[in-house]
Amino acid sequence: MMSGGASVEETLDLWASGLRSAKERIAPLFTQKRAAASACAFLDVLIGNDPRKTGWMRAEAAGDPGPWRQQALLGRGHWDADALRDVVREHVVEHLGTEDGVLVIDETSFLKKGQASCGVGRQYTGSAGKITNCQIGVFATYVSARGHTFVDRALYLPKDWTSSCERLKQAHVPDDVVFATKPALASMMIERSLEAGVPFRWVAADSVYGVGYVKRTLRRAGIGYVLGVKGNHWFGSWATNPLIAGEAKDIAANLPEQVWHRLSAGHGTKGEQLYDWAYLPLADLDAEEFDCPIAGP
């Protein structure tokens, strides 16, 4: 028996039913039955146990004689990736959506050796902790008491890509794509989630996103946020007593010890992740200042 009271057989039946439902949702995105079948087989392989999933390994697991069908699906097939994103988002809202949900923005890198992959270049990646040859994607994850999963994504294109029309054309980048910073990409994803009716009260992100783009988007929407900033980020309060001004690191250093609270962010690869938090109001803003119909936290 499983800890939740369901047998192994019942759990497997539930998984199989959920997978069939997912396939039924995505199949209409593909105009040919053969392409839809390849997409469903690709999904089977992605959630399989194989630690490495090269083209040949995926083909073997799917029962194909070679990787050509899956290569065609990923490289030459015509289907709407944004429509697939919307299907995934609808599924997430249906099963995980709660009014007090949280949208988490973060990026990750994909290490590459060549120069042909779209957006690849020598750039800093936190995954490797250094500047290296890679692609970088910005992702939005939905988190609630029911679970968590991805709901949106955007590929970051460095300026040496967006400034080269020939390079963009060779990588089949749409003509309307222009350079956008990571915070700008994050703001677009937040706005898409709001327009789609994704229920969330907070957005969390690290210091890459603790800048104007994201804050303005959230303030206008009346959404609360917890955004990291660098130690030299300058803050100035207004309508507070006493008034506060200075760099983040100096403000934090001058706070009395008793206002700090140590909280756990869960377990990581090196054990429990503990952080010290202090609450310091810097302003009391009216929603009308940002053309917002409701006040954010």
Image (spheres, rainbow, N blue to C red):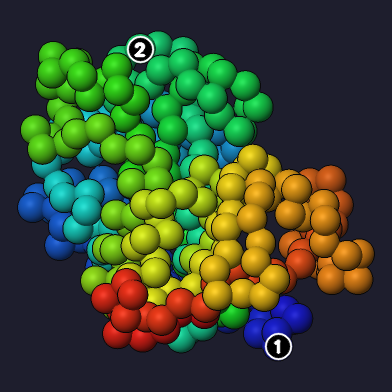
Whether residues under marks 1 and 2 lie with C-beta atoms below 8 angstroms apart, the answer is no
User: Which residue lies under the disc numbered 1?
Assistant: 5
Outermost residue, right side: 257
In this view, the residue in front, 50 or 221, is 221
At x 13%, y 14%, the residue is 166
Position of residue 93 in the picture relative to residue 261 (left or right): left
Between 36 and 124, the one lying in front of the other is 124
Position of residue 96 in the picture relative to residue 166 (left or right) = right
Residue 32 x, y percent position in the rendering: 9, 50
Of badges 1 and 2, nearer the viewer stands 2
Q: Position of residue 260 (x, y in %)?
A: 84, 67
Gap between marks 1 and 2, in whole Å? 51 Å
The quadrant holding residue 7 is bottom right
User: Is residue 11 among the parts visible in the rendering?
Assistant: no
SS at circle 1:
loop
Instruction: Look at mark 2 in the image and give the residue it sits on.
Output: 115
**Amino acid found under the numbered disc labelled 1:** Gly
Tell me where residue 262 appears, x and y as whole percent: 85, 65
Q: Residue furthest top?
A: 114
Crowd around label 2: few <14 · some 14–19 · many ≥20 (10 Å) = few
- Percent of width and height locating residue 140: 43, 56
